[in-house]
Image (cartoon, rainbow, N blue to C red):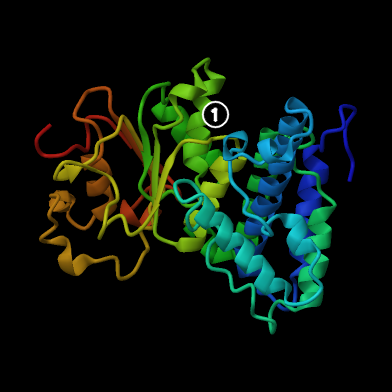
Amino acid sequence: MKNNKDNSIDISSLSNHLWEAANILRGPVDAADFKTYIFPLLFFKRLSDVYDDELAAALAESAGDMEYARFPENHRFQIPQDCHWEDVRERSSNIGHALQKALRCIEQANPDTLHGIFGDAQWTNKDRLSDALLKDLIEHFSGLSLGNENCKADILGQSYEYLIKKFADLTNKKAGEFYTPRSVVALMVKILAPKAGETIYDPACGTGGMLLEALHYVTAHGGDAHLVLGNLYGQEKNLTTSSIARMNLFLHGADDFHIERGDTLRQPAFYSGDSLATFDCVIANPPFSLKNWGDESWINDPYGRNFAGHLWFCGHVALCGCPSEAARQGMAKPQALWPGAQPSHICHWTNEFVPPWH
């Protein structure tokens, strides 16, 4: 592993090392499922290494008082006893069982932030994940030092996004379900120009790329990132993808956000009283080709989103915009939705496509 002069991991070395981890899974695991295993392991290793950093700092502060150093107040996330990365690493048999137990216990110890974040990978399936394979994978990850001192959040976040793109390339047609090309995301965010203090919502957030780009845009234009955190909202139907989005934001250093798993059309997650919550900026690349999206109940939609006819996600996005002239909404849409348009054409409106009461 190559480090730069200040002993921190560089992005190229980290990205390559993470990709090599995925290659260890080749054969027993389908390429489309790499993300189900690699991202949770990466996040688990990061949590454990940062916990060790915090423990060392607390020990130095308390003249070696281990009881004090383990106080929950000294740690961003709690890691229960016997659930650290090194605890799992020490196992030589039933590694999958030890790993699954550790991940679930960490989720339970951090219910407000990490509930369900490791997804539903079947770590105990030895036909797919033998002890030998898991041992190789864990030893490979153990070659990484992912604490804050050696691995800055921006480097780790960029490497995470590199993996997301690589996994999207592997899955071909399925890629659009969880990944939007960065150039498209950057253009959409630039059009909407979010500002510090505004609420930003992605109703089909995938792996969280648009929300992260909005955060980056604000800071790049001199805005206070702290005024964006807490104002990022997203919903994603797929369990694995929603977990990846949450890990993505955490690994980029975004500690305060609202990502909910669920069906945005059938069960929208964000409300204001009896109505849908509204946001300053709504940005999305919805799954317009989705089948069985709920058209049978759309005619009686309780929120009035059916004013847009068959353009169901357009109706949702429009109604989620704040009822003010400053509200902005933007979507990427397929060519078939508006004949004659270019593929992945960007749709942006402020006054052209609005709810009936505007």
Q: Depth check: 254 or 289 in front?
A: 254
Count all numbered tags in the image, as a single digit: 1
- Residue 120 picture location, percent across and down: 53, 68
Q: Quadrant of residue 101?
A: bottom right
Q: Depth check: 214 or 329 in front?
A: 214
Looking at the rendered structure, the kind of residue marked 1 is His
Is residue 180 in view from this perspective? no
Q: Residues within 10 Å of mark 1 (few under 14, many from 20)?
A: some
**Is label 1 in a helix, a strand or a loop?**
helix
Does residue 247 lie above or below 93 as drawn? above
- Residue 314 picture location, percent across and down: 26, 47
- Residue 277 picture location, percent across and down: 24, 40
Does residue 332 lie above or below 225 as drawn? below
Is residue 288 in view from this perspective? yes
* Horizontal side, residue 65 vs residue 190: left or right: right
Q: Residue at left 75%, top 60%?
A: 87
Q: Quadrant of residue 347?
A: top left
Q: Residue at left 89%, top 41%?
A: 2
* Horizontal side, residue 174 vs residue 23: left or right: left
Q: Depth check: 261 or 353 in front?
A: 261
- Which residue is labeled 1 in the image? 216
Please state, as top left, top right, bottom left or bottom right, where the C terminus lies in the image: top left
